[in-house]
């Protein structure tokens, strides 16, 4: 299972140098952005449908089949929107 980018960077001491930047800017790749965005959905009970999502997060304990029904806070919605903007800017595959 992948660990969050912040966890990986903390061990290398790089986290201090980039902690002030917004999350999407810290991501090194489209994969990192995808993982960060979907990690939020997983934490709130989303049931993944794609092979990639299921392999990365599983569906144990999931409750919501529709991403629009996942109960997200305003802050989580802003973070997801920021990540999606960065994904579009980087032309990440959908």
Image (spheres, grey):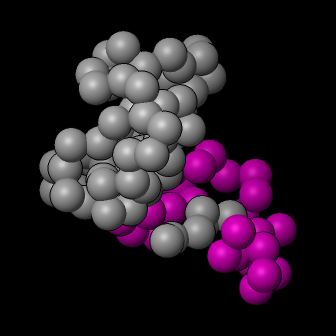
At x 39%, y 54%, the residue is: 58
* Residue 93 image position (x, y, % from top left): 16, 56
Q: In this view, does 25 lie to the left or right of 90?
A: right
Magenta stretch mostly in which secondary structure?
A: helix
* Residue 74 image position (x, y, % from top left): 58, 15
- In the image as oriented, which residue stretches furthest toward the bottom? 12
Q: Is residue 90 shown to the viewer in this render?
A: no
* Residue 76 image position (x, y, % from top left): 56, 27
Q: Is residue 25 left or right of residue 91?
A: right
Q: Is residue 32 shown to the viewer in this render?
A: yes
At x 68%, y 64%, the residue is: 6
Would you place residue 93 above or below residue 68 in this image? below
Would you place residue 4 above or below residue 91 in this image? below
Q: Is residue 71 left or right of residue 65?
A: right
At x 59%, y 49%, the residue is: 23
At x 56%, y 38%, the residue is: 43
Q: Quadrant of residue 75?
A: top right
Over which residues does the magenta segment extend?
7-32
* Residue 27 image position (x, y, % from top left): 50, 62
15 in magenta? yes
Q: How many labels does the image show?
A: 0
Q: Which of 38 and 6 is in front in this view?
A: 38
Q: Quadrant of residue 38?
A: top left
- In the image as oriented, which residue stretches furthest toward the front? 60
42 in magenta? no
């Amino acid at each position: 299972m992948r660990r969050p980018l912040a966890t990986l960077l903390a061990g290398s001491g790089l986290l201090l140098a980039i902690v002030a930047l917004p999350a999407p800017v810290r991501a090194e790749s489209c994969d990192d952005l995808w993982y960060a965005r979907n990690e939020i959905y997983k934490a709130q009970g989303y049931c993944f449908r794609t092979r990639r999502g299921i392999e990365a997060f599983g569906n144990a304990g999931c409750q919501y089949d529709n991403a629009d029904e996942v109960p997200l806070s305003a802050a989580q919605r802003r973070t997801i929107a920021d990540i999606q903007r960065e994904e579009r800017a980087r032309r990440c595959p959908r």
